[in-house]
Image (cartoon, grey):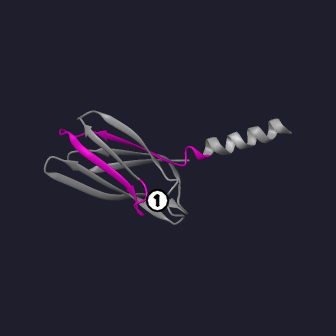
Amino acid sequence: MKRTLTILILSLVSCDSKYGVEFIVRNKSTVTIDSVRITTSDKRSTIKLIDIMPGQEKREFLSMREVLKVDGDYHVEINTPGVTKINNIGYYTNGAPIDENIDIHYFDDSVKCDFKLR
């Protein structure tokens, strides 16, 4: 009985540690990305990636433990020399992510996103 209870508690704790979504930013442009700021629409969770060279990618996990239990999306601001691109992407429901990761491809003339559902 103790073993079953221990396993149950550990599994619940380990699931909670991944309560969020991983963002992958791939720079497929010819310029360096100065910064990428990603926030939830309630602004309770934010990550920032800096200095992404052409051909490089960076990953960061956006924890959603503090996000309000409402529906929302992700606000993405990408800054390069002289250009700022702002997009609202993705979706979460009741404060919980529906995606395992979101892959952002930054091109010279556009931004494309791929979503991997849980």
User: Which quarter of the figure has residue 33?
Assistant: top left
SS class of the residue under badge 1? Answer: strand
38 with respect to 50 (left or right): right
Q: Position of residue 79 (x, y in %)?
A: 22, 49
Q: Going 43% across and 60% down the picture, which residue do you hit?
A: 73
The correct choice, above or below, for 56 with respect to 9 in the image is: above
Which amino acid does the dot numbered 1 rest on?
Tyr
- Whether residue 66 is in magenta: the answer is no
Q: Residues within 10 Å of mark 1 (few under 14, many from 20)?
A: some
The correct choice, above or below, for 66 with respect to 15 in the image is: below
Q: Which residue extends farthest right? A: 1
Q: Going 39% across and 38% down the picture, which residue do you hit?
A: 59
Q: Which residue extends farthest left? A: 82
- Whether residue 43 is in magenta: the answer is yes
Q: Which residue extends farthest top? A: 55
Q: Position of residue 45 (x, y in %)?
A: 43, 55
The correct choice, above or below, for 72 with respect to 21 in the image is: below
Q: Position of residue 81 (x, y in %)?
A: 14, 46
The correct choice, above or below, for 110 with respect to 33 in the image is: below
Q: Mark 1 = which residue?
A: 91
Q: Going 55% across and 63% down the picture, which residue do you hit?
A: 94
Tell me where the magenta segment starts and ends, as one range. 16-45
Q: Position of residue 37 (x, y in %)?
A: 32, 51
User: In front here: 104 or 11?
Assistant: 11
User: Which quarter of the figure has residue 5?
Assistant: top right
Quarter of the image with the N terminus in it: top right
Q: Going 26% across and 37% down the picture, which residue do you hit?
A: 52
